[in-house]
């Protein structure tokens, strides 16, 4: 053993490798992304690593590998689990041969997600065991144990860290290379009675799943990471917690008159016998958890089943907030109110609010030019702009104001179709990025063509998966294993599914881009414009733009139209921040008096 300073996600990856991992696949999504990337960086050549086209594909690939006896990890964030749910819900009935861990990172807050989705519910819904780490060290150790339980019970298992565990750092004890396990897959053994799902098989499997989970409830009551810490002084109060919230509880109880504490590391199947042991001598228990009252409801159920008089408090009773992530201070005040201690910050002056810093598209981002081109082309016309998940969601911000809807990955295509069916006089646009196009928008395009929609698909192709850290995708021509492969051509795909008009244009050639949008969008049916220009982070910046103060009339059109962070006001005048400007030339094409030197106006 030795010490390493690791991010939580890196600890998960290194723990999985130490457990004999054979295959890791997934789809990037904060806060889960670094798990797969760390595995790729530490691949000794024996590990297969894949960024799959979406979470469903990853789940199915992982299942096939696990059928063959491989130890497999599938990574995603909480909303990605929705995409993977179809194969998952059948996989629970078939089970696996090799250990299979589904690493789902939840995002309380939410910090970078559409929803505050709690995967502990999904574990109960899918009847799969769930492991919930509370620290970086525990994440490293628990992921290895998760593989053991998965193999022993022939079932996929969830591993559910949250953002503060995923992105926290700690100096932890890790195994030396000579301590790593080696797993040699047996290979796939044909057995249609096991691997081909039929109603009769599912009926029998369901019975066995319920028996297994009842057994696991008892097993998890003895699991070393489900812990009761007795009260340090006469006290008939207790606190139940889990995950990072348990760490906050420990911090709050330092040097205090401690109540009893129950730590739940396996929210499903719930360690019922351990809960009874904890509750039987207590009058009140406060549940502190993220995000939903999962532990709280389980303890209420246990009290009813075993006729215990313990009062259970938490989110359902209004003692803990019902949304958002917990913090050290919020947890301390929850416990302080419960225990009758003095609250934090009672006499301190109110902290002034931090300045508002809304997220914006980067300076030089080609998406800004794409949005502006469509906005200019549709000026004066009744239009709707359906957005999607990615950097380009930020096109909703002023002054662009070009995202009217955003639901989930790929949804904008069919939302635009739906609006068009109700409002045929509206010009309907759908914006989708290149990675999202491959992940979930192709079926939407097929649906639109098949059902005779009248809409314009705008593909924002910046040659990467930008928002989550520039991961490769089918259009980049490379894989996570370092292979150089043929790029999947978006224009060819669209023509292949039936689009007659598909045009590719550089959005930074503004006049051409505007003309293309006007012409293409005027056609009937489903048509597409591919705005192709690389992400500003991927290219070497050109010479920054310069403002000719003799020409500048201080109209601020460049600022009021584009909202580029490199264009600023200083001493009452428009300036270019050369440290941010990439020299994309868009502002020079917008300036009405040619006062900005750039690509077009040197």
Image (cartoon, rainbow, N blue to C red):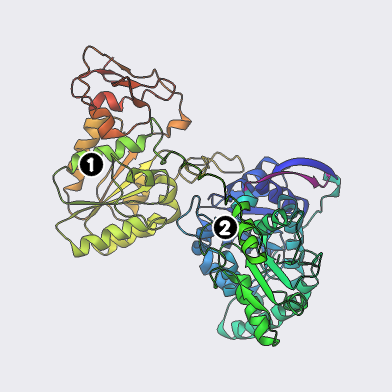
- Please name the residue shown 41% across and 57% down the image: 408
Could you tell whether 579 is left or right of 48 in the image? left
Quarter the N terminus occupies: top right
Tag 1 and tag 2, C-beta contact below 8 Å? no
The front one of 459 and 277 is 277
491 is higher (above) or lower (below) than 271:
above
Furthest residue toward front:
347
Instruction: Tell me the distance, in whole angstroms, between the alpha carbons under discs 1 and 2.
Output: 36 Å
Classify 145 as above or below 563.
below
Q: Tell me the tag on residue 375.
A: 1
The stretch drawn in magenta includes residue 174: yes
Which badge, 1 or 2, comes first in the chain's sequence? 2
Please tell me whether mark 2 sits on a helix, a strand or a loop.
Answer: loop
**For residue 447, which quarter of the picture?**
bottom left
Query: Can see residue 93?
Result: no
Task: Quickly name the residue at label 2.
Answer: 106
Q: Quadrant of residue 252?
A: bottom right
* Magenta stretch bounds: 167-176
Residue 526 visible in the displayed image = yes
Determine whether 100 is above or below 209 in the image: above
**Which image quadrant is residue 310 in?**
bottom right
Q: Is residue 292 magenta?
A: no
């Amino acid at each position: 053993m030795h010490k390493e300073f690791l991010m939580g996600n890196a600890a998960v990856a290194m723990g999985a490798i130490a457990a004999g991992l054979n295959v890791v696949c997934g789809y990037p999504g904060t806060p889960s992304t670094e798990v797969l990337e760390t595995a790729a960086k530490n691949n000794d050549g024996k590990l297969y690593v894949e960024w799959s086209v979406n979470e469903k594909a990853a789940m199915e690939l992982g299942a096939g590998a696990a059928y063959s006896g491989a130890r497999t990890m599938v990574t995603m964030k909480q909303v990605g689990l929705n995409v993977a749910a179809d194969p998952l819900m059948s996989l629970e009935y078939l089970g696996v041969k090799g250990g299979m861990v589904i690493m789902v990172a939840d995002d309380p807050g939410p910090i970078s997600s559409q929803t505050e989705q709690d995967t502990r519910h999904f574990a109960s819904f899918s009847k799969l065991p769930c492991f919930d780490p509370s620290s970086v060290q525990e994440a490293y150790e628990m992921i290895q144990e998760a593989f053991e339980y998965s193999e022993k019970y022939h079932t996929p298992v969830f591993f559910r860290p949250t953002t503060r565990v995923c992105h926290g750092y700690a100096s932890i004890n890790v195994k030396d290379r000579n301590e790593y396990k080696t797993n040699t897959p047996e290979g796939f053994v044909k057995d249609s009675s096991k691997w081909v799902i039929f109603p009769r098989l599912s009926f029998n499997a369901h019975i066995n799943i319920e028996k297994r989970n009842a057994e696991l409830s008892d097993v998890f009551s003895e699991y070393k990471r489900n812990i009761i810490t007795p009260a340090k002084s006469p006290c008939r109060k207790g606190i139940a917690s889990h995950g990072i919230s348990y760490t906050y509880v420990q911090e709050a109880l330092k040097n205090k008159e401690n109540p009893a504490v129950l730590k739940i590391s396996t929210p499903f199947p719930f360690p019922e016998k351990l809960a009874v042991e904890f509750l039987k001598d207590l009058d009140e228990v406060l549940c502190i958890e993220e995000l939903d009252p999962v532990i709280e409801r389980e303890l209420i159920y246990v009290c009813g089943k075993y006729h215990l008089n313990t009062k259970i408090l938490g989110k359902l009773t209004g003692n803990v907030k019902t949304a958002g992530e917990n913090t050290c201070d919020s947890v301390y005040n929850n416990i302080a109110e419960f225990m009758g201690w003095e609250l934090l910050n009672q006499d301190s002056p109110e902290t002034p609010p931090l300045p508002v810093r809304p997220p914006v598209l980067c300076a030089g981002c080609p998406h800004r030019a794409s949005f502006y081109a469509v906005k200019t082309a549709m000026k004066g016309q009744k239009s709707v702009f359906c957005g999607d998940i990615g950097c380009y969601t930020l096109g909703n911000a002023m002054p662009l104001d070009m995202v009217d809807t955003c639901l989930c990955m790929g949804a904008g295509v069919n939302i635009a179709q739906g609006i068009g069916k109700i409002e045929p006089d509206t010009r309907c646009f759908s914006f989708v990025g290149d990675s999202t196009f491959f992940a979930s928008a192709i079926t939407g395009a097929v649906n639109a063509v098949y059902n005779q929609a009248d809409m314009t698909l705008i593909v924002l192709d910046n040659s990467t998966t930008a928002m989550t850290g520039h991961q490769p995708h089918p259009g980049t021509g490379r894989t996570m294993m370092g292979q150089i492969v043929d790029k999947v051509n978006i224009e060819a795909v669209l023509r292949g599914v039936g689009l007659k008009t598909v045009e590719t244009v550089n959005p930074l050639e503004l006049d051409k881009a505007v003309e293309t949008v006007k012409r293409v969008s005027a056609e009937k049916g489903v048509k597409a414009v591919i705005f192709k220009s690389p992400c500003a982070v991927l290219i070497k910046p050109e010479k920054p733009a310069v403002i000719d103060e003799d020409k500048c009339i201080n109209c601020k059109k460049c600022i009021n139209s584009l909202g580029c962070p490199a264009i600023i006001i200083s001493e009452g005048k428009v300036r270019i921040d050369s440290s941010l400007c990439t020299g994309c030339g868009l502002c020079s094409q917008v300036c009405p008096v040619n006062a900005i030197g750039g690509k077009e106006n040197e």
